[in-house]
């Protein structure tokens, strides 16, 4: 054989080896999709969450090589917070990777409603941390939905508990007015059912004030608030709607310390644009605060300092960035839980669903992960896809968020019957046979 032919044959063998190795590596990857919105009216809130979610996955790859020897691959798809675009992203990404998408985090209640119809057939779980369908905490009916850490009915219950404590007791709610200023979408409408039940139980007048998307114009709504004089305003907004609401409250001199936002209305982009008018504004917390904790040191070392992050310096450690970290931690720990049962290999969506449903994060495990001080223990089961129903309240002092309350737990005497009723109606409508959770393992 001539020298040239031998060289070419050698190069071909090396090339084939590289291709084979690359193919083998690709078969040992776990694909995680990211539905994001980095553009449009909701970008100020969508970007920091997306950055935190991506950075945690990048950190696991850089520090640990992924999970148990399986590399994590991640791809974003821009939804613009639009349901139709979210569904398009889902269809495009659900089959990627050797085993398909591990899970989806829609970051939109509207997209969640649409994907709830698709996930069972595709066998892909939905992690809707702190949003989505409140009744989907009932895992017997909603097998593929996981509203981890809190639903909007949990949030509504905690908000009313906090107001009652401020007023001196639940009996003091009678005859008071509580307004819900909400994004006129499935997201904003979710707390209405729970608030309606509580208004009847405690005797307060419940005012519903919708705001058309995107919510930048609210003068007529705040004129109504000025005329009605509610004792408290609950803000269920997102994106530019939040800062616009806080600004308009200042314009009509409504006391900001009598405004309580849901946890999607309680981050830096919601108050900084309002300037001094935001001081005193309060919001619920999805457990975690702003600030830097143990996990941030590793993200800084393996991702930020290496120039592998899109996050801006002032975003690192803010509320929504931290929420993105938490979201990816819960998803990847579910994958790790699934691997403990099915083996250290890429998991299918069905196997990850099992992992989420058996997720049991103890205080010790949370500390080892670097999330101590951010969230408390969470234990998911067939019957309970929420896993935890705790929240606190923090307040913007003009420069930073400060935690101002103890922990509140949602009142299940109110919430559970509502969940069973609505989940039961959904099951009947969709002809779903609820699982017998006593037989699940």
Image (cartoon, rainbow, N blue to C red):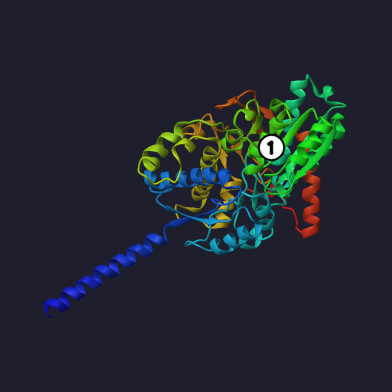
Q: Nearer the viewer, residue 307 or 364?
A: 307
Decide if residue 416 is in sight here.
Answer: no
Residue at (49% x, 31% y) in the render:
367
Q: Secondary structure at mark 1?
A: helix
Query: Compared to 175, does 419 lie above or below?
Result: below
The spot of residue 406 in percent (x, y) is 65, 23
The spot of residue 141 in percent (x, y) is 72, 52
The spot of residue 247 in percent (x, y) is 66, 34
Near mark 1 (Cα within 10 A), the count class, few <14, some 14-19 or many ≥20, is many
Q: What residue is disc 1 on?
A: 245
Residue at (77% x, 55% y) in the render:
427
Which residue lies most toward the bottom here? 1
Q: Nearer the viewer, residue 245 or 15?
A: 245
Lateral position of residue 172 relative to residue 441, left or right: right
Quadrant the N terminus occupies: bottom left
User: Which of the 4 image quarters holds residue 7?
Assistant: bottom left
The spot of residue 395 in percent (x, y) is 62, 27
Number of callouts in the render?
1
Decide if residue 307 is in sight here.
Answer: yes
Lateral position of residue 101 relative to residue 159, left or right: left
Query: Compared to 180, does 110 lie above or below?
Result: below
Residue at (49% x, 43% y) in the render:
52
Query: Compared to 162, does 353 lie above or below?
Result: below
Residue at (64% x, 50% y) in the render:
108
């Amino acid at each position: 054989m001539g020298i040239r032919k031998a060289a070419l044959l050698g190069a071909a063998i090396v090339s084939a080896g590289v291709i084979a190795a690359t193919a083998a590596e690709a078969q040992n990857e776990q694909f995680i999709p990211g539905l994001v919105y980095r553009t449009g009216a909701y970008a100020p809130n969508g970007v920091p969450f997306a950055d935190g979610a991506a950075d945690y996955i990048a950190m696991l790859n850089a520090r640990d090589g992924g999970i148990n020897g399986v590399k994590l691959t991640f791809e974003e798809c821009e939804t613009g917070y639009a349901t139709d675009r979210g569904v398009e992203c889902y269809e495009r990404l659900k089959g990627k990777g050797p085993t398909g998408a591990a899970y989806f985090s829609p970051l939109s209640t509207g997209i969640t409603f649409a994907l709830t119809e698709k996930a069972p057939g595709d066998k892909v779980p939905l992690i809707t941390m702190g949003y989505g369908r409140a009744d989907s905490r009932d895992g017997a009916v909603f097998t593929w939905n996981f509203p981890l850490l809190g639903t909007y009915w949990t949030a509504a219950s905690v908000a009313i508990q906090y107001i009652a404590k401020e007023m001196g007791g639940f009996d003091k709610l009678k005859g008071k007015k509580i307004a819900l200023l909400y994004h006129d979408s499935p997201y904003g409408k979710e707390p209405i059912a729970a608030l309606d039940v509580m208004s009847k139980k405690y005797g307060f007048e419940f005012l519903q004030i919708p705001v058309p998307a995107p919510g930048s114009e609210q003068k007529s709504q705040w004129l109504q608030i000025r005329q009605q004089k509610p004792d408290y305003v609950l803000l269920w907004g997102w994106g530019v709607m939040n800062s616009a609401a806080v600004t308009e409250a200042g314009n009509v001199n409504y006391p900001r310390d009598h405004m309580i936002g849901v946890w999607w209305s309680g981050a830096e982009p919601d108050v900084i644009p309002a300037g001094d008018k935001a001081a005193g504004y309060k919001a619920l917390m999805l457990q975690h605060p702003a600030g830097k904790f143990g996990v941030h040191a590793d993200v800084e070392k393996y991702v930020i300092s290496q120039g592998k992050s899109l996050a801006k310096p002032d975003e690192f450690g803010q509320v929504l960035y931290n929420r993105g970290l938490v979201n990816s931690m819960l998803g990847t720990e579910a994958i790790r839980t699934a691997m403990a049962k099915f083996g250290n290999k890429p998991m299918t969506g069905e196997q990850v669903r099992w992992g989420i449903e058996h997720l049991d994060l103890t205080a010790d495990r949370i500390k080892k992960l670097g999330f101590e001080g951010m969230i408390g223990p969470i234990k998911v089961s067939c019957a309970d896809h929420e896993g935890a129903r705790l929240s606190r309240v923090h307040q913007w002092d003009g420069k930073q968020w400060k935690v101002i309350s103890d922990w509140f737990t949602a009142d299940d005497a109110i919430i559970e019957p509502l969940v069973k009723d609505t989940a039961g109606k959904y099951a009947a409508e969709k002809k779903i046979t609820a699982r017998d959770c006593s037989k699940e393992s």
